[in-house]
Amino acid sequence: MANTSTRTLRLLSLLQTHRYWPGEELADRLGVSVRTLRRDVDRLRELGYPVEAQRGVDGGYQLAAGAALPPLVIDDEEAVALAVGLQAAAESPVEGVAEASVRVLAKVVQVMPARLRRRVEALRAVTVPVDWGASAGSGVDPDALTAVALACRDSERLRFSYTAATANRSDRHVEPHRLVCLGRRWYLVAYDLDRGDWRTFRLDRLTAAEGTGARFAPRTLPAADAAEYVRAGLNATPRSNRVEALVEAPADHVRAHVGRWGEVEEVDATRCRLRMTADSLDWPAMALGSLAADFQIIHPPELRTLIADWSTRFARAVERPAE
């Protein structure tokens, strides 16, 4: 089903790029038979897309001239998921993926109902992506995400409830500035009106976000941009776990993988020492596993225990026969 759905979307994309496609050429582009192409065209018609067919030796397909594409039938949460997923893909280092993601996001937004288009475009406009690699994150309420995005875009004061790392809960009244997407975690950079200073808020700790209707003149952020402000705050936050490992790989290779999350010290041409601090040992374990190199845990012993546990479960997953 997944392959069929993907092929159907690809067919629609091709039909939108050219006024007319010869049947055999279109089938070749999709890597299917002419018979399968006919079934895919029928599926598009069932979804409401006006595809015309010309029969005969030189037969082919085209979207009906002047016909408007039907509205995209998705709910609010799906619209948010679409925007987040395609925006993340637009930051991909994989060749061709970024450009294609930008193209498809632009096409999809054009056929969205106006209400959803406004939400998605707000999210795109006020989000600052940061490529620091994957990090473990908690779920973010889509309603909160879009409410914050709209308030940022419209310079509208915002109220919400916030649970700090200490588990203390408080009501906040802020002037939202920007959203920052860092790995799998979202942050709001805002001026806290009650505390008279700039603050960073994790969106997975934020609930009941609601615009107040009061507009404000944007203040000057005390940093080059919102992403830098979030970085500075995270780097200043005390981390409970200090990790040190000896990695059997060149220092440049390790730096390219861990980025700013770790300090890399060259031992020799083929080995380096990696030091990290983290509030959870899961991230260092994932980072070390992603290096595709042997390594030795120097500290802490709890990380050795964690990796040993993961290794046992991974081994069981490989040994278990596929159902």
Image: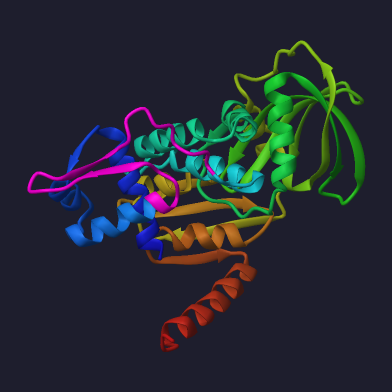
Query: Is 246 on the left-hand or right-hand side of 283?
Result: left
Of residues 1 and 158, the one nearer the viewer is: 1
Q: Tell me residue 43's x, y (percent).
A: 37, 56
Query: Is 194 on the left-hand or right-hand side of 317?
Result: right
Residue plotted at (84% across, 21% down): 213
Say whether residue 292 is visible.
no
Residue plotted at (40% across, 66% down): 1
Q: Tell me residue 38's x, y (percent).
A: 25, 56
Residue 49 counted in the magenta span? yes
Quadrant including the C terminus: bottom left
Residue plotted at (54% across, 63% down): 285
Of residues 50 and 249, the one nearer the viewer is: 50
Say whether residue 179 is visible.
yes
Examine the image and state in which quarter residue 248 appears. Answer: bottom left
Query: Is 176 on the left-hand or right-hand side of 88?
Result: right
Q: Residue furthest top?
A: 217
* Magenta span main SS: loop
Q: Which residues are magenta?
A: 45-72
Residue 80 counted in the magenta span? no
Q: How many marks?
A: 0
Examine the image and state in which quarter residue 7 appears. Answer: bottom left
